Amino acid sequence: MTRFLLLALLLSLVFIVKLFEWNPQSVTFQFLPNHPLTLPEVTFFVLALGLGAGFVMLVHGMGDLLRWVRNLREVREEKREEKVAALWKKVREELNRSHTPQAISLLERLVSIYPNHTEALLLLGNIKRSLGDTNAAIRLHRRARVFDEEDVRLLAALAEDYNRARRGEDELALFSEYFRKREGRNVDILGIYRDRLISQEKWDEALEVQSVLSRSFQKGERREREVAVLVGIKFETGKAQLSRGDTDAARRSFRSALKIDPSFPPARIGLAEAQFREGRVTEAFATLEEGFRRDKDQVFLERLEEMALETGSPDRILALFENAVSADPNNSGLLYARARLFDRLMLVDSAVELMESLEGTENWEGEFYGLLGDLYLRKQDRVNALESFRKGAHGESRTGRYVCRHCQARQVRWAGRCPSCNSWGTVMVHPGFFQPPGPSDEPASRYAPGGPGLSDPTWDAYSLGQST
């Protein structure tokens, strides 16, 4: 091979010498002003050929150099990944053995080698939070989100950090920023965001989020549950507007809730309250009467009773009670409510007669016998009064005239949302007699949560996946 190259070189030199003999002409070039340069044509040709060859060699040399550098980087990256994989395996082993300090040391070493290892940053931050170091967890999860802002696990982990650190405004700001983005539609994250807004009674923002969330599912149980929550939030929005005196906006919110679920008592009661405050008494009565005809819920009768007595028209509520009892004469709870109305209207004889007819029909609670004893005292019948009070003292006695159909908790005041289980539309008038507890027929769809709660100790950020 060497001899062949030497032969080629000699032949090239001979060829160049012959070119000088065949081409004696010269060429004059002026590269700079007043500095002409005269070169033989063959010299010019050889220089051009040499420059071209040198350029080709330079290009190929740079390509080889770049490939060498790339290969060197790949080798280093492979070695680093092998080291990271080994460290990651050790971390899992230490965690499985409950050796948390050793796992933390390994994770810190791992992120020092591989600063953008989001899995390690996420896990290290979660461990720091579990140990109570929320500030360190926040720093680590913020650092991880610099490398991957679209990973919802990192978002949820940072939100939980803020929640544990009692930085509610930062948590809501984080969720809000995600929600405003085009890709911010992960249903689990939206469910957590919605729950946080509900817990802080930010109903306008919760309504906006829930409107998106309820449209994120196809027809089925989950969609029905989210729509039920949407109805509850619309009611709370109207309630907040009513408390601010904005009765017009409140009416629209209550009507919007009823449009979705006409059998939702809190929205109908809220609508009647807004109408009553605006002086539209006839409309308010009609709204409540329609609700009672539709749902047979005694809460409507109680609110009608209050409005009728407040406006000085007891005949209307008496007539309504009479019609209700005629339609359902064996409803002990309804008859007891009618007796309480007689008591408020000072119709003592009618109240006593009705209460005596009810005594013995049910296992009445102490409140029933307390009312009957008071009625006997007002009739100067001390013997029967004492007997009634004695029965009341030995009978079942519970606090609260209202009960939640879902959790069976007793309440002193009626509310559109049960304060014990956070169910909407489940608080009803207690009939007044003891009923043995049984399985609730009220679905949990009135309850707010839609995804895994961050406060759930079994919740793991990894379960949220990567979808947005």
Image (spheres, rainbow, N blue to C red):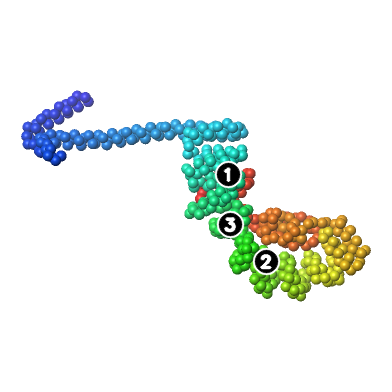
Residue 357: give its label. Answer: none
Are the residues tagged 1 and 2 within 8 Å (C-beta)?
no
Question: Type of residue at label 3?
Answer: Ala
Residue beneath the point at 67% across and 64% down: 265
Which residue in the structure is indicated by mark 3?
206
Are the residues tagged 3 and 2 within 8 Å (C-beta)?
no
Cα gap from disc 3 to disc 1, whole angstroms: 21 Å
The image position of residue 112, as x and y in percent, is: 49, 34
Give the camera-side residue of 256 and 376.
376
Q: Dot 3, crowdedness within 10 Å: few (<14), some or many (≥20)?
A: many
Instruction: Kindly give the residue lying farthest to the front in the view shown.
Output: 34
Cα gap from disc 1 to disc 2, whole angstroms: 40 Å
Left or right, residue 241 beside residue 303? left
Disc 1 secondary structure class:
helix
The image position of residue 371, as x and y in percent, is: 84, 63
Question: Type of residue at label 2?
Answer: Ile
Give the camera-side residue of 75 and 305.
305
Which residue in the structure is indicated by mark 2?
269
In the image, which is nearer the foreground, mark 1 or mark 2? Answer: 1
